[in-house]
Image (tube, rainbow, N blue to C red):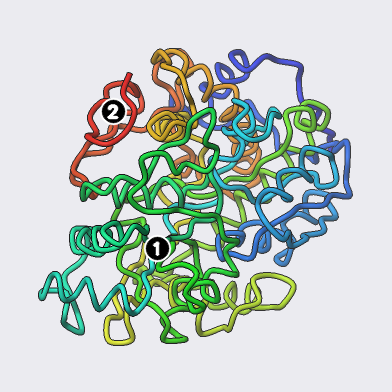
Amino acid sequence: MKVYNTRKLNSARKLSKLNLVFGLGMMVSTVSAETLDVEKDSLKFGFIKLTDCAPIVIAKEKGFFEEEGLQVEVIAQPNWKQLLDNVITGELDGAHMLSGQPIGATIGFGTQAHIVTAYTLDLNGNAITVSNSVWEKMQANDPALDTPNPKHPITADALVPVVQEKLDLGEKLKMGMVFPVSTHNYEIRYWLAASGINPGFYTSEDQKGFTGAQVELSVTPPPQMPATLESGNISGYCVGEPWNQQAVAKGIGVPVVTNYDIWKNNPEKVFGVSKKWADENPNTHLAVVKALIRAGKWLDEVDASGTLINREEAVRILSQPNYVGADFDVIKNSMTGYFFFQKTDKRLMPEFNVFFKNHASFPWYSDGVWFLTQMRRWGQITETKSADWYHETAKEIYLPEVYLEAAALLVEEGHLDPSEVPAFDANQKWAGYKPATPASDFIDGIAYDGRDPVGYLNAHKIGNKD
């Protein structure tokens, strides 16, 4: 077999070439299916014990990494900070990351390091859970919630009197999220602010984000969320699975809303590497992305009736102690298309976890722009920024050219159909941007267009404006 060496092309030239493959709908005849001459074949990838690490785990367990000539060790990390630090120092070659981590690190919030991503691991996958006592108070405030099957989505309106009651006592309702630049932090803030609850601001002097807060949001590692809730140290949290379903199984809390209902089909995790590593290992990076694309497709494979056919096998793998380590039945709930809000309230949610379909794994610039708007909205970015700054910054971090090159090889190899790869015309100004998300897809009724970050930022009542 021929050896494929990544050509020393700049991003614009690469994208123009790949546009001939996908953007203009031509047959993939200009790219050959070849074995990549990887620079490094023994790799270590980090992850946090959440179900959305699945593409990395499946790429290993189903042999997709091995087929690319890679021997990969997948290692659980104790928290998001250490995971990021280990990627920066080179202890890890890459990792399952919060979407905000490459962005926060690259712009210097908390940690300064240039981190990039060429692959989005999943869409959706999170929920907000409150303690039983808070849920009872919410039901008292809104009798429509006091039913075995309340109407969804549930806003934070019924939480407002609970927050005020605490404030009247000189206290604040304490809630958990997993990391300052996590989707979970922005989602719980989004949900609270949509009902007029101020979740607080970060400032140059306040790195905890408590300034002006009516609730106190603190960092708790995902696997510790249920125990922290049960102990009474927090009264609610936003986290990924299986830690919301764990609260239901243990009878200690009630998930009130999923992030699918906060923003339908929102980006969740990414596969991140350092820019230095990506520059030094271009073929290895391509090989990794090829394997991850195949894993994501395997996870979303359905039969003729639309039923997910590989998820139970994935759940059995993820439930192993060296991976997520939660009970099979707990992980199965959300991964197989259902979600329990209460034991009496099981709902069909086929898109709770999306790993591939509808171009879910593509690294859209507009996703990066959304996270930047949230960092500015809540003060993690302290200064006014122009629209051009948002676009330029996203393009320093998101690498669609790597994804497209990997996808082109997979098409030639017969593992992908060209229709499964998004069109990308590098000559178009807004290539890499999703169409505007309609207001109906957000819990606060505000549409999002990644091409207009400043307009979106200024549309919210609570938050910094530019």
Quadrant where the image shows the N terminus = top right
Q: Amino acid at mark 1?
A: Ala
Say what secondary structure mark 1 lies in. strand
- Quadrant in the rendering for residue 359: top left
Q: Residue at x 62, y 17 (%)?
A: 11
Front residue of 36/93: it is: 93
Q: CA distance from mark 1 to mark 2?
A: 24 Å
Q: Quadrant of residue 283?
A: top right
Q: Residues within 10 Å of mark 2 (few under 14, many from 20)?
A: some
The earlier-in-sequence mark between 1 and 2 is: 1
- Is 248 left, or right, of 93 in this rendering? left
Residue 395: mark: none
Residue drawn at (25%, 78%), measured in percent from left and top?
Answer: 136
Residue 38, compared with residue 396, is above or below; it is below
Q: Nearer the viewer, residue 228 or 8?
A: 228
Q: Is residue 114 above or below residue 227?
A: above
Q: Position of residue 92 (x, y in %)?
A: 81, 47
Residue in the image at 36% along x and 56% along y: 259
Residue beneath label 2, please?
Answer: 456
User: Where is residue 201 drawn, in percent x and y?
Assistant: 41, 37
In-front residue for pair 378/430 = 378
Q: Residue 387: horizontal and vertical position, in percent?
A: 39, 15
Q: Residue at x 61, y 13 (%)?
A: 13
Say above or below: 305 vs 345.
above
Residue bearing mark 1: 127
Question: Which element is circle 2 on?
Answer: helix
Give the amino acid type for the residue marked by disc 2 in the picture: Tyr
Query: Where is the C terminus found, in terms of image quarters?
Result: top left
335 sits to left or right of 326: left
Q: Is residue 95 above or below residue 306?
A: above
Residue 240 pos. (x, y %): 49, 62
**Which is nearer the eye, 295 or 269?**
269
